[in-house]
């Protein structure tokens, strides 16, 4: 079920036991998942239900979107933290540890992120429509429809996987298996398509602090990350070392966010991570240009109307309750306001 090859920075867990009719089998797997979140904050999940052809279609449609003329992408521009939908141009967002606008602006000026993205939220939220590529006459009309349908379907599949992971966490924490179900009904999550354009290696030689995406933690409960094979994702250990999260075909990388750490009274780790130039190939020379990198992140949150109280069992006589209740939606908006 759970294995930790020596060359992997984070645990690798087969989640097929979570669908077992045996409560003890589900509990054993759930305990492994919780332990990974508590010790690393990151893990690989294998045997998940999202098929390779589905993921391949998502990546193909994403690449086609980012290949569109810049004017077409700019027409879909991201607008507000509350909506959090639309296209984010190269250099607009700076992920960092900064909690204020001033701190983030300073980080952005020194080491801008080398990426562009498209943010997609749940459909049907009043006043906050997704900013889909426009349908035009001819071949592009079909492409736009295929893009929208592919992303809508993938959003739903990721929403189901989010619920599965949260049910496992509930079991691992000694709670009722359905404890979190009421927090993930609506699916106030964000599907982010990411494109890191090709970049000259000279950019990294000139500025030793340059990265494709700055060191940061995620904001919500968990993140589901689907990588291409380029590499570049790194996690920071407790000893402040950076370790590569090597892409493994057929897996999804899952990490805990700041809100889940808060929810668990910091018994679960929200681990710092970043995206750098791809690791050099063994025995190979440094490339003059690093190729494009694509990834797909599904940021999971408790439904925005829910109130987040520190979980029962994570505080008591010998464990201080560190946090007061907070509204999920307001918390996420506050964090996004600083980022953009």
Image (cartoon, rainbow, N blue to C red):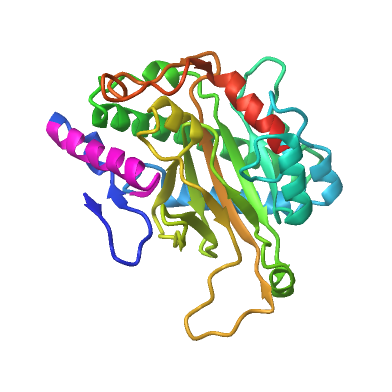
- Image spot of residue 302 (x, y percent): 48, 23
Residue 185 quadrant: top left
Relative to 164, 55 lies left or right: right
Relative to 216, 236 lies left or right: left
- Image spot of residue 134 (x, y percent): 78, 37
- Image spot of residue 210 (x, y percent): 68, 62
Q: Quadrant where the C terminus lies?
A: top right
Tell which of 330 and 196 is nearer to you: 330
Relative to 66, 36 lies left or right: left
Residue 227 to residue 301: above or below: below
The residue lying at 57 percent from left, 40 percent from top is 150
The residue lying at 79 percent from left, 37 percent from top is 77
113 drawn magenta: no
Relative to 85, 299 lies left or right: left
For the question of whether residue 132 can be seen, the reply is no
Residue 15 quadrant: top left
Residue 311 to residue 55: above or below: above
* Magenta: main secondary structure: helix
Residue 239 to residue 122: above or below: below
Residue 149 quadrant: top right
For the question of whether residue 106 can be seen, the reply is yes
The residue lying at 42 percent from left, 56 percent from top is 239
Q: Which residues are magenta?
A: 24-45
- Image spot of residue 126 (x, y percent): 67, 14
Tell which of 172 and 131 is nearer to you: 172
The residue lying at 29 percent from left, 66 percent from top is 6
């Amino acid at each position: 079920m759970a294995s930790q090859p020596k060359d992997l920075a984070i645990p690798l867990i087969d989640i097929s036991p979570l669908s077992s009719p045996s409560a003890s089998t589900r509990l054993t797997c759930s305990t492994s998942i919780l332990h990974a979140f508590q010790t690393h904050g990151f893990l690989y999940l294998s045997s998940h239900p999202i098929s390779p052809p589905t993921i391949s279609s998502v990546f193909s449609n994403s690449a086609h979107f980012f290949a569109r003329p810049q004017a077409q992408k700019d027409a879909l521009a991201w607008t507000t933290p509350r909506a959090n939908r639309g296209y984010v141009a190269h250099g607009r967002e700076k992920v960092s540890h900064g909690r204020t606008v001033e701190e983030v602006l300073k980080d952005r000026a020194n080491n801008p992120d080398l990426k562009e993205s498209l943010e997609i939220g749940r459909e049907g939220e009043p006043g906050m429509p997704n900013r889909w590529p426009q349908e035009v006459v001819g071949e592009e009309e079909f492409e736009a429809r295929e893009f929208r349908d592919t992303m809508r379907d993938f959003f739903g599949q990721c929403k189901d996987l989010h619920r599965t992971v949260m049910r496992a966490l509930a079991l691992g924490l000694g709670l009722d298996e359905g404890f979190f179900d009421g927090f993930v009904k609506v699916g106030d999550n964000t599907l982010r398509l990411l494109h890191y354009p090709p970049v000259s290696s000279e950019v990294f030689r000139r500025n030793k602090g340059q990265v494709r995406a700055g060191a940061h933690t995620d904001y919500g409960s968990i993140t589901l990350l689907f990588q291409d094979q380029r590499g570049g994702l790194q996690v920071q250990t407790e000893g402040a070392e950076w370790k590569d999260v090597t892409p493994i075909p057929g897996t999804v990388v899952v990490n805990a966010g700041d809100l889940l750490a808060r929810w668990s009274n910091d018994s679960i780790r929200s681990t710092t991570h970043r995206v750098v130039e791809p690791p050099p190939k063994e025995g190979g020379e440094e490339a003059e240009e690093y190729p494009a990198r694509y990834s797909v992140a599904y940021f999971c949150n408790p439904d925005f109307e829910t109130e987040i109280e520190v979980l029962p069992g994570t505080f008591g006589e010998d464990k201080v309750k560190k946090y007061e209740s907070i509204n999920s939606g307001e918390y996420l908006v506050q964090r996004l306001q600083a980022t953009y």
